[in-house]
């Protein structure tokens, strides 16, 4: 890999991480005037017109092969339906800072999924890393069980982790198809697939009353999530994963909680508890151990 290619690869990845890093904060802003499921569903629905316009201009198409159709469906359902809905739903019942801490587990999840797909049993650094990272996740949930902070529950933390897992499944599928078809094609069609599933959610679950109740900051947050996280970050991340590999680039997810945890107290006035900081360090330690696994 040339130095120019490497620089472009990591630029794409770090820009995506920067956008993903602020996602928990924007999601929390959105859930202040709307429920989490509605916020998660609106991300793809608001992004869909932009995706359709890009497809119309570029003429990008998904080949009507079983494997290609399957991968774009998994990319759309995992990364742009189940991830934002579960993640936003979880953020509604926890803090943005805690959700940001949970995003670091995505690197461990990516390693686990690739181990299964490659049918190669990982070595001891990976197993220890997974165990340590899981302890950090359980520490967050344990704190929530007895934490006297309004708006925090273990169910919210669990939904965040479930959403992260679904998102990683979508990212892996998208990266496999991106290597063949390109990031623009995979991302835009994944957005349309997601919107097709989520429009009924907006119509029948959210309804006009919910849409009207969302204030200006809420809509600004949702639009930022739609056009920033759902389209731009997903496009950059797919390209980086396809070129650099899921395991190597996935390690950069350890930067996400630093951004989210740093912004949440400033923008939202959320508490920065010792347990939150400890759990974040434990999760990051698990990620570092996973990255010591020989390639």
Image (cartoon, rainbow, N blue to C red):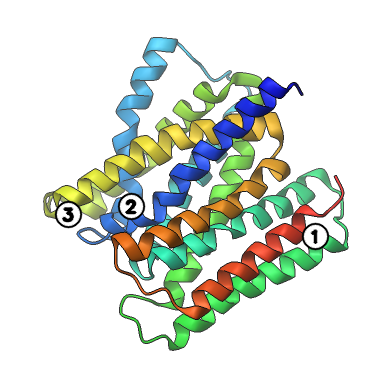
**Which numbered disc, 2 or 1, marks the residue that appears first in the sequence?**
2
From the top left corner, tell me how far across and down residue 142 is, in percent. Answer: 53, 82
Give the quarter of the figure containing the N terminus: top right
Give the quarter of the figure containing the C terminus: top right
Q: Are marks 3 and 2 in contact (CB under 8 Å)?
A: no
Q: Going by the image, does 80 lie left or right of 287?
A: left
User: Which residue does the image show at 44% across and 46% down from the upper left?
Assistant: 81
Q: Residues within 10 Å of mark 3 (few under 14, many from 20)?
A: some
Residue hosting label 3: 210
User: Which residue does the image show at 55% across and 39% down from the upper left?
Assistant: 14
**Which numbered disc, 1 or 3, marks the residue that appears first in the sequence?**
1
State the CA–CA distance, disc 1 to disc 3: 44 Å
SS class of the residue under badge 2?
Answer: helix
Vertical side of 5 occupied by 81: above or below:
below
**Is any part of residue 165 visible from this angle?**
yes
Q: Nearer the viewer, mark 3 or mark 2?
A: 2
State the CA–CA distance, disc 2 to disc 1: 32 Å
Q: Residues within 10 Å of mark 1 (few under 14, many from 20)?
A: many
Q: Specify the label residue 26 is tagged with.
A: 2
User: Which residue does the image show at 58% across and 41% down from the upper left?
Assistant: 171
**Is any part of residue 71 visible from this angle?**
no
Q: Going by the image, does 176 lie left or right of 294?
A: left
């Amino acid at each position: 890999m040339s130095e120019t290619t490497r620089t472009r690869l990591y630029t794409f990845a770090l820009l995506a991480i920067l956008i993903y890093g602020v996602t928990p904060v924007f999601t929390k802003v959105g859930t202040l005037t709307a429920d989490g499921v509605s916020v998660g569903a609106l991300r793809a629905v608001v992004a869909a017109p932009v995706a359709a316009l890009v497809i119309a201009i570029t003429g990008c198409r998904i080949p009507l092969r079983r494997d290609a159709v399957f991968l774009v469906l998994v990319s759309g359902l995992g990364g742009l339906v189940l991830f934002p809905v579960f993640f936003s739903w979880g953020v509604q019942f926890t803090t943005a800072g805690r959700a940001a801490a949970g995003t670091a587990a995505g690197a461990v999840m990516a390693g686990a999924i690739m181990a299964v797909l490659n049918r190669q049993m990982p070595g001891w650094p990976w197993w220890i890393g997974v165990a340590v990272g899981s302890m950090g996740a359980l520490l967050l949930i344990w704190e929530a069980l007895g934490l006297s902070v309004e708006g925090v529950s273990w169910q919210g933390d669990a939904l965040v982790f479930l959403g992260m897992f679904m998102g990683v499944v979508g990212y892996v599928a998208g990266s496999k198809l991106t290597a063949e078809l390109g990031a623009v094609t995979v991302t835009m069609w994944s957005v349309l697939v997601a919107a097709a599933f989520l429009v009924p959610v907006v119509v029948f679950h959210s309804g006009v009353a919910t849409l009207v109740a969302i204030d200006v900051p809420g809509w600004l947050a949702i639009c930022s999530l739609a056009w920033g996280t759902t389209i731009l970050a997903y496009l950059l991340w797919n390209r980086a994963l396809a070129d650099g590999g899921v395991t190597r680039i996935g390690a950069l997810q350890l930067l996400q909680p630093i951004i989210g945890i740093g912004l949440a107290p400033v923008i939202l006035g959320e508490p920065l508890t010792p347990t939150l900081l400890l759990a974040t360090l434990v999760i990051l330690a698990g990620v570092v151990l996973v990255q010591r696994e020989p390639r």
